Structure formats: C-alpha cells, structure tokens
Amino acid sequence: MKPNMGTEDRIIRLALAAIMAALYFTGTVTGTIGIVLLVFAAVFTLTSLVSFCPLYTLVGLNTCPTKK
C-alpha cells in the first residue's frame, strides 16, 4: 500500500475520531447512531495510522506530498 494521506489529513481524521469516541463514551450519542460513530472513529484512526485510505484510491485523491 502506497501512502496517499498527508499529515494534515491524518491529524484532522484523528481529531474527528477522538470527538466521535468522546460523544459515544460520554453518552451524548447513543443507540445505533452511536455505534456507527464509533465504527467511523475506528476506521478514521486505522487509516490515519497506516496513512492509506482505500476510498482515496477509488476517487483518485492523494493528499500525500510528493517526495523529492
């Protein structure tokens, strides 16, 4: 897997994942929507850690800076 996510994109995803997890664990969002948010948080965290997003590949998007 070739990285296709830049640093800013990874930071934004990790911040969103933390917010989603906090909303779920504080009980602000519950039920099915809470579980869906938790799954999204897990996916955002995983893609941020590996710097690769399969959806970006499908759409042809690449936020990773080119190496010289």
Image: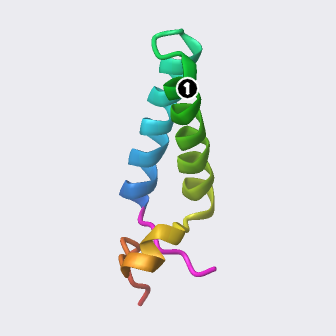
- How many dots with numbers? 1
**Residue placed most toward the observer, 52 or 33:** 33
Q: Quadrant of the N terminus?
A: bottom right
Give how far across and how far down residue 40 sits, in percent. 53, 42
Give how far across and how far down residue 23 sits, in percent. 48, 19
Give how far across and how far down residue 15 sits, in percent. 43, 37
Which image quadrant for residue 41? top right
Give how far across and how far down residue 20 sits, in percent. 48, 29
Which residue is painted at 42% across and 37% down in the image? 16
Q: Residue furthest top?
A: 27
Q: Which residues are magenta?
A: 1-6
Q: Which residue is mark 1?
A: 32
Q: Amino acid at mark 1?
A: Thr
**Residue placed most toward the observer, 31 or 13:** 31
Would residue 5 appear left or right of 2 to someone viewing this image?
A: left
Q: Quadrant of the C terminus?
A: bottom left
Q: Is residue 29 magenta?
A: no
Which residue is painted at 47% across and 68% down in the image? 55
Which residue is painted at 59% across and 15% down in the image? 25
Q: Residue furthest front?
A: 32
Q: Is 45 placed above or below 29 here?
A: below
